[in-house]
Image (cartoon, grey):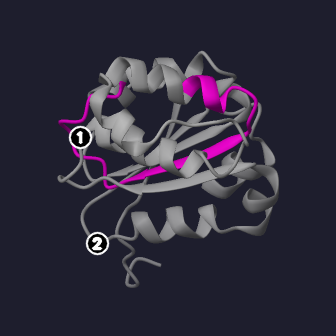
Amino acid sequence: MVIRTMIFYSDEQPSVVVIKGMFGIGKTTLAREIYNHPNVVKRFEYRAWVCVSNVLTMKEIVIKLLDRLSSVNGKSMQSSSYFERVNNQLLQGFLGDHLEELRYFIVLDDLPKHIQLRSFLLALKAQGYGKSKLVVTSHMTHKDLKTNSHDVHKMEPWDPIMS
């Protein structure tokens, strides 16, 4: 179901897919399988994977995405040291501007609950969000991802006795 949403029905399905479940259930493994799927590689011009965990701020996430973007679309980019001096809102707008012409596939792996995504999602949505995908893996429900516009895939433990 998740791979179908990401590859085959990309333009009609929600642009944000959340893969959630308890620790160690395979969320990252599933996201990695999708990320490396040949059809995803072929379909999306820009792919980026950021392991968030509890060590990154939203600003650091955006800087990592901008660093990875610099080699993709040929537009001139500022240096990482410039990005570090700029406020988060300007960085998110800058990311949105550079993603404008690209079909992108971004994975935010192991997103903790304290990361604020609202302005990040708005910056991406303003730039042709429908043709692109954002995948979020998390073990908890994130308040900015509790809407009907997001596809949530809840991973459950597999019980061989019940099969």
> In this figure, what is the number of numbered marks?
2
- Residue 114 part of the magenta segment: yes
Return the x and y of residue 2 as percentages of the image width and height: 61, 53
Numbered range of the magenta stretch: 96-117
Q: Earlier in the sequence, mark 1 or mark 2?
A: 2
Of circles 1 and 2, the one toward us is 1
State the residue at coordinates (75%, 51%).
Answer: 7
- For the residue marked with disc 1, what is the amino acid? Thr
Nearer to the camera, 79 or 22: 79
Categorize mark 1 by other alpha carbons within 10 Å: few (<14), some (14-19), many (20+): some
In the rendered image, which residue does mark 2 sit on?
A: 24
State the residue at coordinates (70%, 27%).
Answer: 130
One can see residue 105 in this view: yes
Residue 70 versus residue 156 in the image, above or below? above
Left or right, 67 with reference to 4: left
Categorize mark 2 by other alpha carbons within 10 Å: few (<14), some (14-19), many (20+): few
Question: In the picture, which quadrant includes the N terminus?
Answer: bottom right
In the rendered image, which residue does mark 1 sit on?
A: 57
Residue 33 versus residue 141 in the image, above or below? below
- For the residue marked with disc 2, what is the amino acid? Gly
Residue 61 quadrant: top left
Check if mark 1's residue and mark 2's residue have beta carbons within 8 Å. Answer: no
SS label for mark 2 = loop
- Residue 57 part of the magenta segment: no
Left or right, 26 with reference to 151: left
Return the x and y of residue 88 as percentages of the image width and height: 32, 24
C-alpha separation, residue under disc 1 versus residue under disc 2: 23 Å
SS label for mark 1 = loop
